[in-house]
Amino acid sequence: MSTRYPAATLAVAVVAAALIGCAPAPEPSPTPTPAFASEEEAFAAAEEVYRAYNEAGNARIAGESDPDPQDFLIGEALEADIDGIRFFDEHNLRLTRGGTVASIEGIDYSTIGADARVSVLVCLDVSEVRLLDSNDTDVTPPDRGDVVSQIVELTGPPANLRISLESEGEVDRC
């Protein structure tokens, strides 16, 4: 009888191995596709988003509520916009008009899975923009130049890039 158990155990092991071998293979996980086909495509998408954001900001300055510039913002950029609105309200300040995009230049592009991070240099013409107080007195800083330079970072999936960070850039690059 002692020789039967090893043979039975071997038979069970062979059947188990056969059954495991017949089990369907696990589904391969999808390979993430690059966020954009090229760096140029990423920069073009970032420019499109930034220009739409700038137009929405100019519409807000003109008193229109749609489109909302905050729809183009996330993270630190959204927080900065909220803080800016609060500051203007608390100090009874307003802008006469918005700036116009003079140029946008791609700086850097990277991917994290299917998401992208795109950095661009934005040069804004603010020569016609004036800051007014509650008495309509021009309080525009006298040393402000006609062009403002910003480094803008956009993040997210290609179909939904959002501005996540804006910081001061080098004016001499504009």
Image (tube, rainbow, N blue to C red):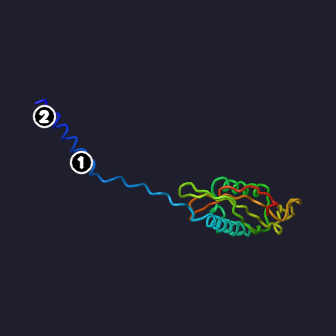
Q: Residues within 10 Å of mark 2 (few under 14, many from 20)?
A: few
Q: Which mark is residue 4?
A: 2
Q: Secondary structure at mark 1?
A: helix
Residue 7 to residue 159: above or below: above
In the rendered structure, the answer to whether residue 146 lies left or right of residue 25 reads: right
Q: Specify the quadrant of the image occupied by residue 59.
A: bottom right
* Quarter of image, res 88: bottom right
> What's the mark number on residue 18?
1
Numbered mark located on residue 35 in the image? none
Q: CA distance from mark 2 to mark 1?
A: 21 Å
Residue most extreme to the left: 1
Quadrant in which the N terminus is drawn: top left
User: Left or right of 97: which side holds 14?
Assistant: left
Residue 14, x across and y down, in percent: 22, 43
User: Between residues 155 and 133, which one lies in front from this camera angle?
Assistant: 155
Residue positioned 70% across, 54% down in the render: 80
Give the amino acid type for the residue marked by disc 2 in the picture: Arg
Q: Residue at x 63, y 56 (%)?
A: 74
Q: Is residue 62 left or right of residue 130?
A: left
Q: Position of residue 117 (x, y in %)?
A: 62, 57
Disc 1: CA contacts within 10 A as few (<14), some (14-19) or many (>=20) = few
Image spot of residue 2 (x, y percent)? 13, 29
